[in-house]
Image (cartoon, rainbow, N blue to C red):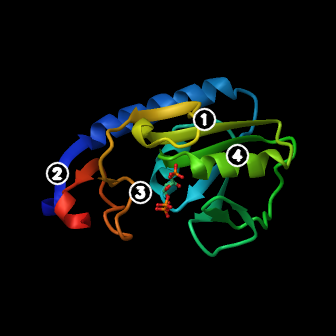
Amino acid sequence: MKDDLKNVLFSEDEIKQRVGQLGARITHDYAGASPLLLGVLKGSFIFLADLARTIELNCEIRFIAVSSYGLASFTSGRVEFDSNLDFEIARRHVILIEDILDSGETLTALRSFISGYCPASLKICSMLDKPARRKVPISADYLGFECPDEFIVGYGLDYAERYRNLPYIASLKPEIYT
Ligand code: PRP
């Protein structure tokens, strides 16, 4: 697996330190509240697991499945997700948790969808941002790192459903995906 990588962009230690900072900020900003951490599947699962353990609040944790094809009944552009929520959003402080902001289409669609349920507040927390790829204007309220316009894997991010389990974030050699 390591032979397929070009560069390590963010090491395990760097990630741990940054995630701890984000968790401390969220703990401070939501003091006295019980935010709903809403993880966007599948890429966010490792980030959310680590981040949640650094937030010293009585959080609720939920997930929403997003796909670029075929899942469900709410569609915006290429983004589709399961719109049958089995939990309450109204009057909740919701934080969308993502692994990466790329074109911005996923979070734009999701933010619009969740807003329709009248949350008390709605923020975005993303581990990575790839601004060079943005198609729609959106930014994270809580951001781990900006990353270059390369094929990135690890810490939840995949290529063909592999490399998600790398404990660091790396770029993939072009010959692997071309
Ligand atoms: C990735 C990532 C984000 C989305 C970001 O998901 O996890 O959800 O793309 O891209 P965007 O800003 O261009 O919309 P992907 O569709 O690869 O699914 P996955 O999370 O299951 O890997």
Q: Are marks 2 and 3 in contact (CB under 8 Å)?
A: no
Q: Are marks 1 and 2 in contact (CB under 8 Å)?
A: no
**Label 1 crowd (10 A; few <14 / some 14-19 / many >=20):** some
- Residue 113 coordinates in the image, percent (x, y): 76, 52
Secondary element at tag 1: loop
Quarter of the figure with the C terminus = bottom left
Q: Nearer the viewer, residue 123 or 129?
A: 129
Question: Which of the numbered marks, if any, corresponds to residue 156?
Answer: 3
- Residue 111 coordinates in the image, percent (x, y): 70, 45
Query: Residue at label 4?
Result: 111
Q: Earlier in the sequence, mark 1 or mark 2?
A: 2
- Residue 143 coordinates in the image, percent (x, y): 49, 33
Q: Earlier in the sequence, mark 3 or mark 1?
A: 1
Question: Which of the numbered marks, if any, corresponds to residue 6?
Answer: 2
Query: Residue at label 1?
Result: 56
Which label sits in the foreground, 4 or 1? 4
Q: Is residue 1 visible?
A: no
- Residue 99 coordinates in the image, percent (x, y): 47, 49
Q: Is residue 32 visible?
A: yes
